[in-house]
Image (cartoon, rainbow, N blue to C red):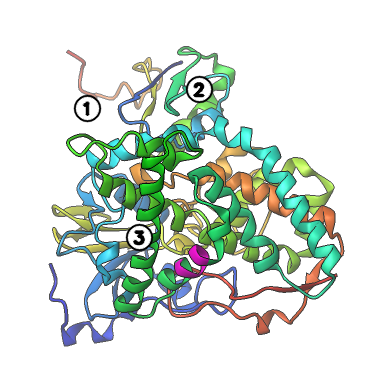
């Protein structure tokens, strides 16, 4: 999983550093710092909490396009990427 | 913008309404919450605004840049008469939109950061223990507001800002005068006294640089052509001093009441001190001390859940009701310190007591720390604490949005 933190949006609420302390911290200015931009899957739950709680929408989990495994995902109306 | 006074609004739900129980929203809000997420309510001046009781709708609206927090706008709703006072228009940080908001908030971010708050904790614990020792020495009955709930946040914010605590009786009384005023005139009078006091204080800091506290530092950063004018600094000082002590003190008081009235929850907290942070957020959720997560005005038409919020419409987010949205909080009216068990401990922070979006409370981590310390030191120091009057006899605040008690008689 890849995570990003946009310091230009950060309002220093601190939820991310509490939810996922191995992934996020804050600097001297109080604003978010990413400690681990590619945390392991075992951190997914806490990183999702950090993303959900961030009030200024500074935290994002980059979701790579899922492999179309189910028949639903492969349905004809799914627009092909181009 | 809807007409300021129309007879057609007379049938609408009158906002605000007093609580019947100190930790539960007014019965009228509970009825609204059952009807859906968005409601039209009537204010004191006859204007109607949207009241939001749904959690997801509240988060979407509070994070939407088309919703303005600018209190100097003519169409910004004054939810209470006192909020019509010129001193509240504009109020620093919470009453500004970007980019000014972001610049001022970032000036303060280092002082209210997690690390800063954690570093302050031992000092706050010492302070709380000293106050408990004073109460034990004085003997029961004691007014917990005056002896404990107010001095903790009041001393903490005055030290953090660099405001002399010796002046606490003055700024506490004027803050209550401002926040509990029934008219714009009374609010303006109390607000101007605080303003003049802070003006004098900042003048002294300008003359004698190098003093302690945020205001001393910022006094050295004033630049009339830059990001922080002297008037900006005065407005920031006023907002931090007011916001820094009344809400937290009343949250300590009503939190103690809620714990005493739920002995099984208090016992669970005592049995496992590790529950303390989650218990504090559960109390913040339940008590919803300000009972408002934010007031805004729409700057464009916004479609949400089949309704259209028109440009110029006022919007008020109810924290007590969004904090009881059953989609997010099962058994929403129950006080359960173990609510987050099994999930990430931080997930208990989904409540909207501190708001959401860029205006989410600057002092939230300081407040959480003060509450953790206040509850743990109090129940450790006075284990057989109890209310000194029946719950129904508590002198509760009335007629506004900020919840609280005028006094909290306790015994042991």
Mark 2 surroundings: few (<14), some (14-19) or many (≥20) residues within 10 A: many
Letter of the chain that mark 3 sits on in the rendering: B
The residue to which callout 1 is attached is: A77
Assess whether residue A38 is covered by the magenta stretch: no
Numbered disc in front, either 1 or 3: 3
The residue to which callout 3 is attached is: B195
Q: What are the residue bounds of the magenta stretch?
A: B170-174
At 56% from the left and 46% from the top, the residue drawn is B159
Mark 3 surroundings: few (<14), some (14-19) or many (≥20) residues within 10 A: some
Front residue of B163/B387: it is B163
At 64% from the left and 51% from the top, the residue drawn is B371
Quadrant placement of the N terminus of chain B: bottom left
- Disc marking residue A24: 2
Q: Secondary structure at mark 2?
A: strand
Mark 2 to mark 1 CA distance (whole Å): 39 Å
Assess whether residue B171 is covered by the magenta stretch: yes
Q: Secondary structure at mark 3?
A: helix
Question: Where residue B139 appears, x then y in whole percent?
Answer: 85, 70
At 75% from the left and 40% from the top, the residue drawn is B274
Q: Is residue B341 visible?
A: no
Q: Marks 3 and 1: in contact by CB < 8 Å? A: no
Mark 1 to mark 3 CA distance (whole Å): 63 Å
Q: Who comes first in sequence, dot 2 or dot 1?
A: 2
Question: Where residue A7 appears, x then y in whole percent?
Answer: 35, 24
Q: Secondary structure at mark 1?
A: loop
Letter of the chain that mark 1 sits on in the rendering: A
Question: Where residue B161 appears, x then y in whole percent?
Answer: 48, 45
């Amino acid at each position: 999983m890849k995570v990003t933190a946009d310091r230009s949006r950060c309002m220093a609420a601190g939820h991310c550093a509490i939810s996922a302390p191995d992934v996020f911290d804050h600097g001297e200015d109080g604003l978010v710092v990413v400690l681990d931009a590619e945390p392991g899957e075992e951190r997914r739950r806490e990183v999702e909490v950090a993303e959900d709680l961030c009030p200024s929408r500074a935290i994002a989990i980059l979701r790579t396009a899922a492999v179309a495994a189910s028949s639903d995902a492969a349905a004809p109306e799914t627009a092909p990427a181009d | 913008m809807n007409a300021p006074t129309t007879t057609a609004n007379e049938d609408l739900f009158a906002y605000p309404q007093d609580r019947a129980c100190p930790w539960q929203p007014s019965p009228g809000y509970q009825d609204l919450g059952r009807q859906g997420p968005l409601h039209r309510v009537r204010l004191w001046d006859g204007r109607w605004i949207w009241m939001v009781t749904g959690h997801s709708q509240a988060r979407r609206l509070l994070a939407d840049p088309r919703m303005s927090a600018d209190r100097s706008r003519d169409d910004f709703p004054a939810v209470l008469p006192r909020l019509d006072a010129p001193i509240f228009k504009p109020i620093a940080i919470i009453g500004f939109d970007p980019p000014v908001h972001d610049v001022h908030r970032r000036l303060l971010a280092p002082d209210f950061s997690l690390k800063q708050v954690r570093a302050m904790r031992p000092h706050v614990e010492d302070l709380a223990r000293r106050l408990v020792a004073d109460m034990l020495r004085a003997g029961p009955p004691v007014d917990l507001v005056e002896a404990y709930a107010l001095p903790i946040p009041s001393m903490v914010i005055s030290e953090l800002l660099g405001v002399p605590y010796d002046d606490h009786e003055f700024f506490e009384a004027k803050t209550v005068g401002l926040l509990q005023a029934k008219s714009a005139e009374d609010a303006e009078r109390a607000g101007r006294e605080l303003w003049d006091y802070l003006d004098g204080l900042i003048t002294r800091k300008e003359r004698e640089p190098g003093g302690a506290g945020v205001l001393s530092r910022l006094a050295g950063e004033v630049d009339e052509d830059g990001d922080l004018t002297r008037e900006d600094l005065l407005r920031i000082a006023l907002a931090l001093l007011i916001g820094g002590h009344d809400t937290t003190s009343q949250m300590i008081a009503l939190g103690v009441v809620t714990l005493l009235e739920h002995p099984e929850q208090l016992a669970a907290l005592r049995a496992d001190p590790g529950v303390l942070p989650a218990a504090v957020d559960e109390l913040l959720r339940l008590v919803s001390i300000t009972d408002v997560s934010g007031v805004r005005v729409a700057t464009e038409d916004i479609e949400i859940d089949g309704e259209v919020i028109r440009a110029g419409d006022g919007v008020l987010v109810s924290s007590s009701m969004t904090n009881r949205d059953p989609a997010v909080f099962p058994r929403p009216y129950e006080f359960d310190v173990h609510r987050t068990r099994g999930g990430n401990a931080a997930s208990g922070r989904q409540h909207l007591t501190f708001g959401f979006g860029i205006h989410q409370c600057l002092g939230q981590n300081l407040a959480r720390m003060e509450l953790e310390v206040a509850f743990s030191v109090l129940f450790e120091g006075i284990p057989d604490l109890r209310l000194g009057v029946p719950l129904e006899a508590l002198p509760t605040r009335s007629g506004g949005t900020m919840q609280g008690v005028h006094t909290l008689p306790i015994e042991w």
